[in-house]
Amino acid sequence: MRTVEEHIRELQHDPEYIAECLVLSLAEEILKHLQDRQMSIEDLATRIGENPRGIRGILRGRRCSIMTIAKIAAALHLRPRITLESLR
């Protein structure tokens, strides 16, 4: 039987797991910046020309395009970054 650590180590190489982690990290970042700015989901949606339901979906872990990320970053006056780091 595999340990939890072994299972997690194996998942670190699974593209689906990596994608889900990225989506959840993005959602956490967006929520943090919305709260810091006392901005509502509706405010953000209006600024980027999106339906609030679409923003809520992203905050619940729905995947979105790079363009949507860029629009959100611009609306929140942020510069998005994508970094790749060694697992070693």
Image: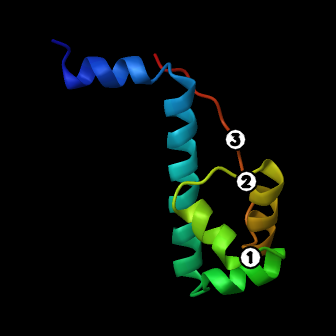
Q: How is the image coloured?
A: rainbow
Inspect the image, locate mark 3, and give the three-letter code of the amino acid beneath it.
Ile
Instruction: Kindly state the secondary structure of the residue where label 3 is placed.
Output: loop
Q: Who is closer to the viewer here, 44 or 63?
A: 63
- Location of mark 1 (residue): 51
Inspect the image, locate mark 1, and give the three-letter code of the amino acid beneath it.
Asn
- Location of mark 3 (residue): 82
Residue 56: % across, % down: 59, 70
Residues at badges 1 and 3 in contact (C-beta under 8 Å)?
A: no
Is the residue marked by circle 3 packed among few (<14), some (14-19), or many (20+) residues within 10 Å?
Answer: few
Residue at position x 73%, y 65% from top?
A: 78
Residue 45: % across, % down: 73, 78
Say how many tags the image has: 3
Inspect the image, locate mark 2, and give the three-letter code of the amino acid beneath it.
Pro
Q: Is residue 2 left or right of residue 40?
A: left
Query: How far apart are labels 1 and 3 at the CA level?
Result: 25 Å
Residue 13: % across, % down: 50, 19
Q: Earlier in the sequence, mark 2 or mark 1?
A: 1
Is the residue marked by circle 1 packed among few (<14), some (14-19), or many (20+) residues within 10 Å?
Answer: few
- Location of mark 2 (residue): 80
